[in-house]
Image: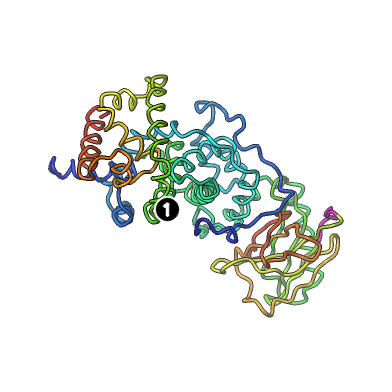
Amino acid sequence: MTYGHSQSRLGCFAHAPSLPATAHPLPELTFDYDATLAACARGERQALQHLYEQEGARLLGVARQLVRDTALAEDIVHDAFIKIWTGAGSFDPQRGSARGWIFSVTRHLALNYLRSQGREVQVQDTALDALAIATERLDWSGVMQAERIHLCLDQLEPQRRSCVIHAYVDGYSHAEISQKLATPLGTVKAWIKRSLAALRGCMG
Amino acid sequence: MTDARDAELEELAGEYVLGTLAAEARAQLQQRLPSEPALRAAVDRWEQRLHPLTELAPAQTPSRLLWTRIERSLAFARPAQPVATGWWNLLALWRGLSLLGLTASLVLAGWLVIRTVPVGSPTYLVVLVAPQSNAPGWVVQANDPREIQLIPLGRAEVPADKALEFWTKADGWQGPVSLGLVKPGETLHVPLDKLPPLQDNQLFELTLEQKTGSPIGKPTGPVQFIGRAVKVI
């Protein structure tokens, strides 16, 4: 799909059956993601709908944070669910968690879009906010110490940690991070390389 | 593999998952993934390491139309599994069809076959079911690959200001094609002379549209009944 062209969207009728997208998702441990993907692979549409109710809002949040545009993020989540539906049969639980896979599918669709389109204007627009937001988030990560990634991120210097968060969560390119942190491009690239190596060492 | 090459692979995989690879490098890596298990494994490890960071993006409730759009597109998405293993496997979406409904529709279809075809038999049969309940609502019968009949199994309820529109799409077609408006409870005869011959697995559906049919020549309303063509021996 070409994103951002409303004429490519079907199903735009007013009396759509409403679907409470993830108003009250089940705890992740209760929802059987593997069984749900297996059911999708068998062609059970209800299973995909359950997955949408369970994760639609969180996937949209991830896509929205990356592309910074709600309509575009909905296009991406739309495409992600079609990809999940057609790819469910080839999902291999040996390669990672089913929940991780649906997030990866969504992120990479958003990243493919971002990297192929570029996003110069918005970076300038959000330069100050995003740093404040990221700082806030890093404080917030204190509540999730159980996650190993946060313990390991805490061991990085704050600016390098910001690089990782800006890239992974906000979808910023090397150049965008360089602009935002007012740091030379080469330095940002080196920080990211070293941060990845440090995270790999820390997390195994 | 040497440690240096190993580190290089990990670094590349890490930048890919992080999202910092440029468009061209991303595309190259994605092309390599199917044929390079070591690279794939490195990417998988990075996906697992970094996945908890997705929690940092605040959830956002989708608009009410998003699921409807997804559901509409599913009708035209290729099935997840290879379909060469026989027609029972094609029909996963019929799993919920009740034994009674299945029996009734096949008996009726069988009766129609016997009644209307002096020589040979219909080549294709489609049972159109409601997507939610899987209740059978219509049978499509083809005596001749150039004409089909849409036969009601009951009387579908249609709001006064709406109409049912009949669509079909075979694998490889650009999009669905309208076969006209349907009157609830009445058999519709559709000549297919402007379309290619019927194919196995061809999709048929009835959508709810405005009284005069879809204004854009593509289905816009919710799917009321849906099914795929199966070859009858």
Numbered marks: total: 1
- Can the viewer see residue B30? yes
Residue at 54 percent of width and 30 percent of height: A31
Q: Is residue B173 above or below residue A15?
A: below
Q: Quadrant of residue B128?
A: bottom right
Residue at 40 percent of width and 40 percent of height: A170
The percent coordinates of residue B148 (x first, y second) are 73, 71
The percent coordinates of residue B172 (x first, y second) are 54, 68
- The kind of residue on which mark 1 rests is Tyr
Q: Is residue A197 above or below residue B107?
A: above
Q: Is residue B158 magenta?
A: yes
Task: Read off the magenta span.
Answer: B152-159
In the figure, is residue B99 to the left or right of B17? Answer: right
The percent coordinates of residue A152 (x first, y second) are 29, 25
Pick whichever, A200 or B173, lies toward us: A200
In the figure, is residue B53 to the left or right of A75? Answer: left
Chain ID for label 1? A
Determine which residue is flagged by label 1.
A113
Give the colour scheme of this rendering.
Answer: rainbow
In the figure, is residue B123 to the left or right of A183? Answer: right
Q: Is residue B120 magenta?
A: no
The percent coordinates of residue A92 (x first, y second) are 41, 42
Q: Secondary structure at mark 1?
A: helix
